[in-house]
Amino acid sequence: RRNVTIQEVGNAAAFMCSDLASGITGEIMYVDGGFNTTALGNPEPA
């Protein structure tokens, strides 16, 4: 895990706006360096 760069966020946004993503609908795309796959990225509610 690491912090992502603004370039990586921009690349993800550009991909989602491109024809390459034409078959993708209704998805949440995390650009967070893997934090969403750990307990740190998805804390349980108190």
Image (cartoon, helix red, strand yellow):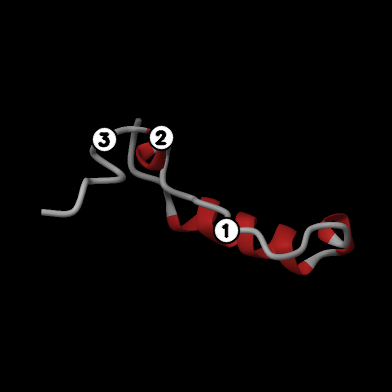
Element under label 1?
Answer: loop
Question: How far across and how far down the image is residue 1, in percent?
Answer: 35, 30
Q: Amino acid at mark 1?
A: Ile
Element under label 2?
Answer: helix
Q: Residues within 10 Å of mark 2 (few under 14, many from 20)?
A: few
Question: How far across and how far down the image is residue 29, in percent?
Answer: 57, 54
Quarter of the rendering containing residue 11: bottom right
Which residue is located at x 63 percent, y 64 percent?
Answer: 13
Which residue is located at x 30 percent, y 45 percent?
Answer: 42
| Nearer to me, 7 or 25 | 25
Picture disc at residue 37 = 2
Picture disc at residue 28 = 1
Q: Amino acid at mark 2?
A: Thr
| Nearer to me, 14 or 35 | 35
Q: Is residue 33 above or below residue 15?
A: above
Question: How far across and how far down the image is residue 39, in percent?
Answer: 26, 35
Element under label 3?
Answer: loop
Q: Is residue 6 above or below residue 2?
A: below
Which residue is located at x 22 percent, y 46 percent?
Answer: 43
Residue indicated by mark 3: 39
